[in-house]
Structure formats: structure tokens, C-alpha cells
Image (cartoon, rainbow, N blue to C red):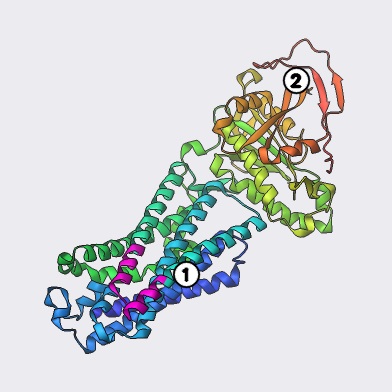
Amino acid sequence: MIWALLSIAALTLSAVSAALLVFKFYRDWDVRASSVQWLFGIFFTYQTIGAVSRLIYLVWLTVIIEETSVPTRDLNNGQAIVGPELYRLGVGAVLKLGPRQKNWVTATIIVGDTTQFGLAIWCLLLMYELSKLVARSMDRGDQHERAKIRLYAYIGHICIVIFLVGEIVLALIFKCYSKYAYIILLGVFMLNIAVLIYMITMVVLLKVKGRKYESVHGRFVASPLYRRLKWIMLVYALFAFHFHSMSIAMYAAPRRTKQLSSYSGLSFVLFYLRGFLLSIAAGCSQPCIMRCLRPCIPDNVMVDYTQRREQVTIPCDWEAPFIKPVFVFTDIESSSALWGIDDGRIMQQATQIHDDILRNLLAPYRGYEITTAGDSFQLAFHTIQEAAEYCLAVQLQLHNAKWPKRLHGLVPATCKVRCGSRTIFRGLRVRMGIHDTCNSEGSLIRDVHAVTRKVIYTGASEVIANEIGDLGAGGQIVVTKRIAEWLAENSSQLTIDFVVEPVCNGYSIPRLNVVLDVFQVLPKRMATRSESFNPPQHVIQIEQDASPIQSDIQMHYTLIQTPRQITHL
């Protein structure tokens, strides 16, 4: 009887916690703004329905077994259904009750089985979306997110309706819950095990690829999305896997049922706690729990916890690049004009979106935030590949971001621009420049800023990167020749398709007495942006015998100024 009460208590706790979490989601979130949010909402809605249906069945089964017993001939090993038999058979116990099955009980079991199947479907889709979000920090934009939600809703509900119809047909044919329906349920358990294997694979791959960290205000911290994905995986592994595997084993090897039944009580309680623990993993965080328990926690424990949270151990190669860093400088086009409109309120919202995108993408590409100057970011990367992929990913996410509606058309640099049927400019336009470090450009001094404690760099390479970052137009990625040549030779190594085009055959930096060839890099899907960038206008021939900063590349001695106005199509 004690295991029955514990199971009922666990199911009640799971049902209540899942229902409260669903209420929180629909109250605080726009669940249709993101496929992940929608999947979380539908997943816990099914979790609530499933927990309630199983709770009703379990209470009924406990009451009927306590009141009566089943003839021994109806059971394995000649035993009556009392106490342990409830947990040994679970839903399968109803198969031994014969005429005592009730139609409403059969309906309750079918609802529970259907929600179990639905949970497997929604969990698989949710894990897929979460893993993609952790790996790519992708933002499809509002329109594409809603299209993805509709796709998931159609696929998921069609599968669930087919499953439900099959269960109902079997119930009508056999006039009760049959063993064939139970076999289908065991198939659902196998599907859940497959989903768990998929979760484990995704978590391991994300960890190996270094996606377990993200950058927050220039500091690497453990990724909240990765942590949430990992906790959901752990809940399934520790509280569901044993139940699913034991249920399959007991049906496949009935002679071992007696031996396995000694663990079934604990297995049922842990499995029924799954909904509660998933609600905690998805809807709560450590700081949230610590705030709730603050009156009960000693001050020294709270201080120690706070210090440990602030001290995140990061792999050494995720710190500031030490040898030959690749610099990226960014700036927002027409930012001064935008800040002067409506007391800067619109620009404040847009800048927050801009900053979040640039910072959230740092961790996947091992970027380091050196400093910010107004709207400009100064970044350093370990390799050309990571710097280039970062810039391409930023341009794509800026294009797909959910900008304030009032931002569009506020100034010419925020107008939507189309080329044919495709939008090529939308929202803030950010110019970006990439330049790598070369020994021929002199020494690069590495120091620590006295106030920010961030690593800073001083040298010709950093100055060149700053100049290149200020050269382009909004939405343009400008690179020096070494970067362009590397990209042309190693294009297959990048995960984002791109095009490289020459901008000018000579750009002079008088204070360094150096001339560079300049190119632009664009995501392939935005290649038509190049038609909107005005060609060079003011070209001045510089008479110079040689440059003190040489490289492997042939230098040309001309000065070019690239206008920053955008030509609207």
C-alpha cells in the first residue's frame, strides 16, 4: 500500500507542477513567437493531461485491488493481484481484471497512452530545436518561426490522431483494453528510449564542439540552453529509462516478472516523478530556487554559492587569442542619426537586439570581446575561419531579427530593400571588417586594461583592422587580401555559403605608410547586396617606393574612400 500512496503522490505532484508551468508559459510567453517556446508549451500540456489520466487510472486500480482480488488462474505464477502486483504490471494489470474493466477506465488508459506517444513526438522535436539553437544561435525571423510551428503542429497531431484512432479501433473490437493495445504502448516505450539516445548524442556532440558556453557581456558562461538540454536528458535517463526498459523486459520474459517486480515499486514512483522534475528543469533555475529558499539558507552558504557561480572554468583556448589573433571591428551605420530620434528610445531597443546577437554568437566561434566603443565592437578570434563564420552568421541573424516596427524606414539606413522577391536589407545595418595578424606588420603588444581587466592589443595589425572595419557600408563585410585568399582556398571548411568580391585594388593608411588590397565577403543568399554598395570614387595616387610593413601580397599605392550611402533598389 505504501508504494501505491507514493505513486499517487508523485503523479499528483507531476500533474500540478506541469499545469502550473503551462499556465506560466502562456501567461509570460508569446508561445507562437518561437518554435521552441511553442514546443515547450505543447509538451507540458501533454505532460499535464498524461499525468492526470494516469492518476485517475492508478487511484481506481488501487481501490479495486484493495477491495477485491482476482482468481489466481488469471495471473502469472498463480498469484492474486494485491500490493506488489499493481506495480509489477502497471497498465498491464487491467488486462487481468476481465469483466471488471470499465468503459471510462479504458478511455482513461487510451488517453494516457496517447499522451505518452505525443510526449515522445514533442520531446524529439523539442530536443532537435534546442540542439539547433545551442549550436547555431539561429533566429529564423517571425514569419519563418510561425511556418515552422505550423509544420510541427501538423506533423505531430497527424501522428497522434492516427495513434488515437488505432487505440479506439482496438478498444471497440475487443470491447476493452486489449493486449494488442498494450503491445503498442510498449512500442511507445521503445520510441522514448530512442529519443533518449538522440538526446544523449546531441548533448555529447554539443559538448565536443564547444557549444556548452556562451558569451554574456564579453564573458564566457555556461550556456543556459545547453544546461537545460542536459538536465532534460538526465531526467529521462534517471527517471524514465529504467521504467521503459523494465516494462519491455517483463513482457518479453514473463518468467522473470517475479524477479523484476521487487524493483517495480521504486521504478513506478521515480517514473511518475518525471513530470515534476521536468517542470523544475524547464521552468526553474538555480538562482530562482536559491531566492525562494533564501530565508532558510545560512549567509556563508549563500556567499559561497554566489562566488562559485561567478567563477566559471573555461577551456584555456577560449580566452583571448594569444598568438596571431584575427581582429573583427563592427559599427552600426547612421547610429548617431538614429539616437537623435524620439530621444533614442527606438534605437535603445534596436541596440539591445544588436548587442545580444553579436554577443550570443561569440561563444560558438570562440570570439573574445576586447571592448566596445559606442555602437562599435572590437573582437578577436583564434582563426580566420571562426572570424569569417562569425561575421556571416551575424549578418544573417541581423537580417532575420525581430526589430521594432518603428525602426523600419526611420532613416535611409533602416529602410527595407528588396532585390527581386528577396529582401536584402532589413533592420540595423552593421559594417564589419576582418584583418589577421602578420609578423611582417611588426610586433603586437598584449596588455590588460586597468579598468575592464580585459585583454587589449596594440600594434599595426590592430590599427589596420580598425581602419578596415570603418571602410565598408552597412551590411558589408570588408576583409584584407590575406583573408580573402584564405577564404577562396578553404571555402569548403565554412558552414555558411559565401561569395568573395574585390572592392578596390589599393587602400592606403597614411599613418602606417601601408597599402592594402580590399575585398568584401557576403553570405551567398545576400550576394545581391553588392549591387547596393557604391563603387569607389576618390582615388589618389600616392608616390611611394616601398612600404615599411610588407607582406606576402603585392601592394598597390592608391588611396580610396568608399561612400557609406546605400543605393535603394
**Quarter of image, res 475:** top right
Residue indicated by mark 2: 515
Asked whether the viewer can see residue 470, the reply is yes
Quarter holding the N terminus is bottom left
Q: From the image, give the main secondary structure of the stretch colored magenta.
A: helix
Residue 55, placed above or below residue 380: below
Q: Amino acid at mark 2?
A: Val
Is 181 part of what is drawn in magenta?
yes
Of the pair 322 and 469, the residue shown nearer to us: 469
Q: Residues within 10 Å of mark 2 (few under 14, many from 20)?
A: many
Asked whether the viewer can see residue 294, the reply is no
Residue 189: horizontal and vertical position, in percent? 34, 63
Labels 2 & 1 near each other (Cβ < 8 A): no
Query: What is the residue that sits farthest to the left in this orientation?
Result: 78
Q: Earlier in the sequence, mark 2 or mark 1?
A: 1
Query: What is the residue that sits farthest to the front in this orientation?
Result: 173
Q: Amino acid at mark 1?
A: Val
The secondary element bearing badge 1 is classed as helix
Residue indicated by mark 1: 161
Is 527 part of what is drawn in magenta?
no
Q: CA distance from mark 2 to mark 1?
A: 67 Å
The secondary element bearing badge 2 is classed as strand
Instruction: Answer left or right for 218 relative to 304.
Output: right
Chain part drawn in magenta: 166-188
- The residue sitting at 84% across, 47% down in the picture is 412
